[in-house]
Amino acid sequence: VKRFRFGEDAAFAPREDLLDGVTIAPLTRSLSDDAPVQAAVFRIAAGGGIKRHEASVPQVLAVLEGSGLASGSDGIGEPIATGDAVYWAAGEEHETTTATGLTALVLEGLGLQPFG
Amino acid sequence: VKRFRFGEDAAFAPREDLLDGVTIAPLTRSLSDDAPVQAAVFRIAAGGGIKRHEASVPQVLAVLEGSGLASGSDGIGEPIATGDAVYWAAGEEHETTTATGLTALVLEGLGLQPFG
């Protein structure tokens, strides 16, 4: 057994144009390290977001805490809150924003399929 | 974009000998459906647990809420709480228990590697 942290103390703030007020705490190695799937907790500060971009691989975003708006290719922001998950297919344009802050698990990987 | 729920309202209680007071809300399809990885939120009631068994594939358990004890092959229960994650290798005997209740994300899949 190996232990590690994914709390706020273990999060880093990537400097990336797509990320606005976002810290990331990884649970797994990244796809760029040849991992079959990458999982991380994204914490988005109030007023921040993950700007519109194309999903490189299938992705599930599961809201652990807080609330916000998520949109797919149609650009219509749908309210999401704790217990809601959204799935985007590879190549789908999408965006996530929050007025009050949001913590989400983000899973990404080839062949990832949402439940149901 | 596709939406679904993984809150308590979407959880089911599998009848399985290894699970004691556990409900599961899947985020992805299961390995038995040929998914490359399966992710689900496990909610363990106070006094419950996931009994000692061998991990069939590499596994990460990330505590989202609550606290408990996790052990690996040596059987020594180490305290885990919100923000702590543990990784078990394929074939490793392990167990998770909680006196007061615990909610965790469980990720399982061939080739899954923990961060760090």
Image (spheres, coloured by chain):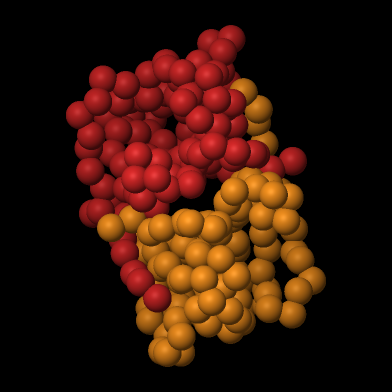
Chain colours: A red, B orange
Q: Is residue B9 visible?
A: no
A48 relative position to B26: left or right: left
In this view, the residue in front, A81 or B51, is B51
Q: Quadrant of the C terminus of chain A?
A: top right
> In percent of the image, x 30 and y 33: which residue is there?
A22
Q: Is residue B25 above or below residue A54?
A: below
A72 relative position to A4: left or right: right
> In percent of the image, x 56 and y 13: which residue is there?
A73
Q: Is residue B107 visible?
A: yes
In this view, the residue in front, B113 or B61, is B113
Q: Quadrant of the N terminus of chain A?
A: bottom left
B12 relative position to A5: left or right: right
> In percent of the image, x 48 and y 45: which residue is there?
A37
Residue A18 lies, in percent from the top left, at 32, 21
Residue A44 lies, in percent from the top left, at 35, 34
Q: In this view, which residue lies farthest toward the top? A: A74
Q: Is residue A11 above or below residue A88?
A: below
Residue B53 lies, in percent from the top left, at 60, 81
> In percent of the image, x 46 and y 85: which residue is there?
B73
Q: Is residue A109 above or below residue B8?
A: above
